[in-house]
Image (cartoon, helix red, strand yellow):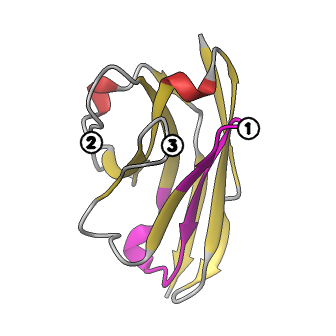
Amino acid sequence: QVQLAESGGGLVQAGGSLRLSCAASGRTFSNYHMAWFRQAPGKEREFVSAINWSAGSTYYADSVKGRFTISRNNAENTIYLQMNSLKPEDTAAYYCAAAVSWRPLSSTPGHYAYWGRGTQVTVSS
């Protein structure tokens, strides 16, 4: 089992920045690819960004490319999502997720076995 706990969400004005963190515990963190997803009210959960087990590869949704940066610190069992130039349409609950590293890095929620409970990000216009 891998336990994930997100933090860092909040209310920010459009154009502002937030940094989300996701702390992992349980099994060896470096055995897992990690990702961020988000879900707005009434919408399906959507992929935001992913990072492979070694931090050598990253993947972004087109909607956040150039504005968000994913990173990880395997020594601290933590991943981060730096979010800049936030827009009202970025408002959602943000979830981190873990997938076993033998799979290719993926944007598919079903490929991720472990999920956190989410942290709310609200961007005001």
* Residue 95 badge: 3
Q: Is residue 102 above or below residue 16?
A: above
Q: Residue at x 48, y 34 (%)?
A: 97
Look at label 2 and name its amino acid.
Ser
* Residue 75 badge: 1
Q: Answer left or right for 55 relative to 39.
A: right
In the rendered image, residue 24, in percent from the top left (x then y), is placed at: 67, 30
Look at label 3 and name its amino acid.
Tyr
Q: Over which residues does the magenta segment extend?
A: 71-92
Look at label 1 and name its amino acid.
Ala
Going by the picture, which residue comes out furthest to the right? 76
- Name the residue that disc number 2 marks: 107
Q: CA distance from mark 3 to mark 1?
A: 21 Å
Q: Residue at x 61, y 79 (%)?
A: 17
Q: Secondary structure at mark 3?
A: strand
Please check the rendered image and state whether residue 76 is part of the magenta-colored stretch, yes or no. Answer: yes
Q: Is residue 27 above or below residue 88?
A: above
Q: CA distance from mark 2 to mark 3?
A: 13 Å
Q: Secondary structure at mark 2?
A: loop
Q: Answer left or right for 22 relative to 114.
A: right
Q: Earlier in the sequence, mark 3 or mark 1?
A: 1
In the rendered image, residue 74, in percent from the top left (x then y), is placed at: 65, 38
Q: Residue at x 60, y 18 (%)?
A: 2
Q: Earlier in the sequence, mark 2 or mark 3?
A: 3
Closer to the eye: label 2 or 3: 2
Please check the rendered image and state whether residue 15 is part of the magenta-colored stretch, yes or no. Answer: no
Which quadrant of the rendered structure holds the N terminus?
Answer: top right
Mark 2 closeness class: few <14, some 14–19, many ≥20 residues within 10 Å: some
Q: CA distance from mark 1 to mark 2?
A: 25 Å
In the rendered image, residue 94, in percent from the top left (x then y), is placed at: 51, 50
Q: Secondary structure at mark 1?
A: loop
